[in-house]
Amino acid sequence: MTDDADPTARNRLDEEESPYLRQHADNPVNWQPWDEQALDAAREQDKPIFLSIGYAACHWCHVMEDESFQDEDVAALLNEHFVPIKVDREERPDVDSIYMSICQQVTGRGGWPLNAWLTPDGDPFYVGTYFPPEPKRNAPGFRHLLEDISDSWIDPEEREEMEDRARQWTDAIESDLEETPDQPGEVPAEDVLESTASAALRGADREFGGWGRGQKFPQSGRLHALMRAHREGGRDAYREVVSETLDAMADGGLYDHVGGGFHRYTTDREWVVPHFEKMLYDNAELARVFLAGFQFTGRERYRDTARETLEFVERELTHSEGGFYSTLDAQSEGEDGEREEGVFYVWTPEGVEDAVSEYGPAAGLSDDDTDLAADLFCDRFGVTPTGNFEGQTVLTLSAPVEGLADEYDRDEDEVEELLRAAKSAVFEAREQRPRPPRDEKVLAGWNGLMISAFAEAAVVDSESWADTAVGALDFAREHLWDEDAGRLRRRFKDGDVRIDGYLEDYAFLARGAFDTYQATGEVEHLAFALDLARTIEEEFWDADEETLYFTPASGESLVARPQELADQSTPSSAGVAAELLLALDHFVAHDRFESVAADVLGTHSNRIETDPVQHPSLALAADTYRSGSHELTLAADTVPEEWRETLATTYVPRRLLAPRPPTDDELAPWLDSLDLDDAPPIWTGREARDGEPTVYACQSRACSPPSRSVADALEWFDE
């Protein structure tokens, strides 16, 4: 059989655009992408599939590649006895969710790399995450595991047991991801927000911030629930947990104190040592929660943190045409030329001194001040000879400016200026280091999350952020959206566009478009959000099951059709879609969007009520359904600066901005572009009065009198 006749006779990943797959194109393993050729080959050759799922910035994926997938003997076993398939979880979250489900059910944990052995029909019979090359800490050695599984597959009795297990596991996957309750309930009651916040409070780490007693992950959805609940009259402890967690994330090693932006998570309870990859979605959701935190607490440092995060994204994760790249790797080259985790970000006192000495003068430091500035930087950010990470230091905020001013007998303003110059010098020195590799996939859904962050920053910080949101939205419309078909593709990479969009792509990008409309008052973004929402209804809504599925009805058939209900590394796509549809219901001439949202929330009400901290996006959507949005219709050619300042500094938890032209004559072209015969209720009768910008506040079909003051309109919500 020739290589052309047997695609599994060679490694085919050099034909792929995914950076993660291309990382493995030189492995001696005959890796296949997940496609019909590979799946057909497994069935024709009657070989089990070895499925390995990871992503470009995954540290332990790199480790397993170095230890096993580069090994000629391991490759020989895989090539002879299996059809090895590599999947980029960022491109194929549907495949990942299916096999991650059974991994979590069987082993009690998940993570990447995710490794699963499947029957030729795709049913899993063995699963795990990282496997060491030799047995270690109760984990089997990878090579011996391959030998055992291949021997069992050719033994008729053992194979029958494996196939029985595969059928049972597939049933378990379907039960976990696909099934819906026989008797859907009602949308959770009005106390859903309080119960969510109360549960989040019970699980909070009040000593170090966040949740958990080991690794610490960002939990933006829980923070939004706590802020919203406190605003609605909840306990002071909700506010305390928000501040404790935001401070911990902004002060610790999760945050990049030199270049801005957040790493994926920390390996410790104290938020000190991160896994150093930087993901677009984390920085999107954290920027949004820090902007909300600024409005909620009035603490300017939270807005500063969000601003620095967005500056990082513009500088390091933005395509020249406007879209956003996916990730920065955890590893980069060290001084010895070997790839090491975190080496780009960590410091020694000597390294800081050298950086400030070389680059300090360009940052405004005199020769007499360089030593002092370096000492202040080391004290401020905890840089010590022993370090906190393999002999070097992950920067954390370790000393307050006022304490340093006292210690060094300097004015606080002078200390601030010296630290600013030292930080600039350290940044320039770091720029000379080999950079972490960048995954330059542009993913529709992740771009939607970041577009929302920039749009929100245009409201809370500076109007100029809207330009970045619009640029990314234009990129998505040009490269990923087929307007004629009304369909979205998930991934763009170097001109190559592939993969039908999932619910997260439509929901996140639609929310980004709607948020951009709210920030700019440009109707084209609202129209795009409505187009995406219509496809959500057509492709992902199942009227019989009364749920939203993650994969489109017209998409590839897998062993299960998953739903995404819980918030994980990204918000629940079902929860975001439900909240989005409730918002867009204000701008359509039918009630289907609201009905879909209500039915989804009713179908999954038991999940929301019994485990709200795992389902905060759905819980927040249920709260919006029960309580109604805080609608602000802004009738004006240009939003007055006074209004902008008020909106920027006021926390309004269910805020829905509905800008419109000041007159109905000017509104008419908007209605044409939205294919509406009549103005929707949120715009009807809400013209500018006496030629002056006018605001209308409404909630649950009750409205304030027209006002020329946003502050007065906001007060109406509290009456």
Image (cartoon, rainbow, N blue to C red):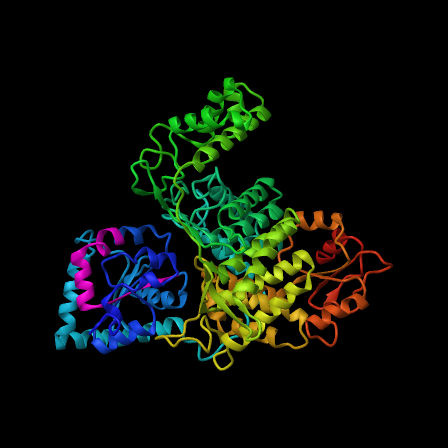
Q: Is residue 315 above or below residue 549?
A: above
The image quadrant of residue 590 is bottom right
Q: Is residue 711 left or right of residue 188?
A: right
Image: 461 above or below 618: above
The quarter of the image holding the N terminus is bottom left
Residue 38 x, y percent position in the rendering: 29, 71
* Residue 181 vs residue 170, the one in the foreground: 170
Which region of the structure is painted magenta?
Answer: 65-89
Residue 613 seen in the current view: no
- Left or right of residue 180: residue 15: left
Q: Quadrant of the C terminus?
A: bottom right
79 part of magenta stretch:
yes
Q: Height in image: 626 above or below 693? A: below
Task: Give the residue furthest to the right.
Answer: 690
Write the residue at 23% across / 61% down.
29
In the drawing, does residue 646 fall left or right of residue 161? right
Determine whether, in the image, residue 342 is placed left or right of residue 413: left
Q: Is residue 256 above or below residue 63?
A: above
Q: Residue at x 64, y 46 (%)?
A: 461
- Please identify the quarter of the rendering in which residue 272 is found: top left
Can residue 483 be found in the magenta stretch? no
Q: Position of residue 415 (x, y in %)?
A: 55, 25
The residue shown at (80%, 54%) is 708
Q: Residue 683 versus residue 627: which sits nearer the camera?
A: 683
Q: Is residue 699 visible?
A: yes
- Overall secondary structure of the magenta stretch? helix
Direction bottom: furthest residue: 544
- Residue 303 position within the rendered picture, expressed as x and y whole percent measured from the top left: 59, 44
